[in-house]
Image: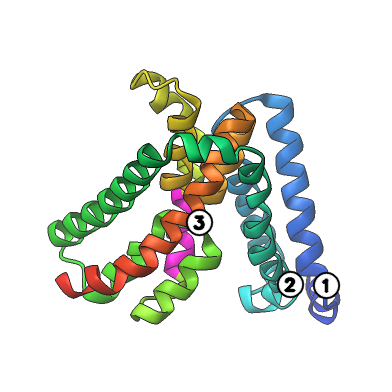
Amino acid sequence: MSTLREILGNSQYWGLTLSIAAYLFACWLKQKTKLAFLNPILVSVIVIIAFLLGVGIDYDTYNKGASYLSWLLTPATVCLAIPLYKQLHLLKKHGAAVAVSITSGVATSAVSIFLMCRVLGLSHTHYVTLLPKSITTAIGMGVSEEAGGIVTLTVISIIITGVLGNMVGETVLKLAKIDHPVAKGLAFGTSAHAVGTAKALELGEVEGAMSSLSIAVAGLLTVIAVPIASKFI
C-alpha cells in the first residue's frame, strides 16, 4: 500500500483518472441494474472515498488531479442552453407559468432552510451555506463564498440535493399526479439543478429544456435572494 501511495502521490493526473473511472463504472452499474438508488454520482463518490481510505491517501493529494474537473463546470452549465434553444417556442408559450413556478420554487427552498435552521438552532454561517443548495455547483460555490458560507459544505449540500432529486423526483411527480412535461422539467431544474436535469432529459426533450431553463433562472434568482435572505438569521 505504501508503494502504491507513493506512486500515486507523484502522479499529477491520477485523481482525474480515478474520478472518471469511478463515474464510468457507476454508469455501467446503473445501466445493468436499473436501480434508482444506484445514482452514478452517489456510487462514484462512495467508490472514490473507499479507495482513498483503503490506500490511505488524503483528500488534498487526490484533489490535485481531480480539481481539473471543476474547470468543466461552467461550460457544462452553458451547454444546457442547447435543449432550451430547441424548445424556445415552449418558453414563449408558457412564460407566465415558468416565471411563477421557478420563483415559487426558489422562495420555498429559502423558507424551508430558514425554518430548519431555526428549529435546529443553526448559526448564520450554516444558514448562508445551505441557501444555495438547489442551484448548480458553478453558481452555488460563488454565492456561498460571497455570503460568508462554508463552500465545502455548500458543495456537499448541492450534491445531496441533486442526487436525491434525481433518485426520487419521478416518483414524487407520479404521486402528485403531475404529468405535464413542462411542469416536470421545471420541478427537476428548480429543485435538483443539473443532476435533476440529467433525469429530466431521460424523460423527454421538453422536460430537459424546461429543466435547463430552471437552472439558469433559479441560479439568478438565488444570487439576488441570498443577500436579502441572509439577514434573517
Instruction: Name the residue type under label 1.
Output: Tyr
- For mark 1, what is the residue? 13
Residues under numbered marks 2 and 1 in contact, where contact means CB atoms less than 8 Å apart: yes
Label 2 vs 3, first from the N-terminus: 2
How many residues crowd around disc 1 within 10 Å: few (fewer than 14), some, or many (20 or more)?
some
**Which of the numbered marks, if any, corresponds to residue 216?**
3
| CA distance for labels 2 and 1 | 9 Å
Instruction: Name the residue type under label 2.
Output: Tyr
Image point (74%, 26%), residue name: 32
Q: Circle 3 — which element?
A: helix
Q: Circle 2 — which element?
A: helix
**Which of the numbered marks, if any, corresponds to residue 68?**
2
Q: Is residue 166 visible?
A: no
Residue 129 in the image: x percent, y percent? 35, 69
Q: Which residues are magenta?
A: 153-161
Q: Nearer the viewer, residue 153 or 52?
A: 153
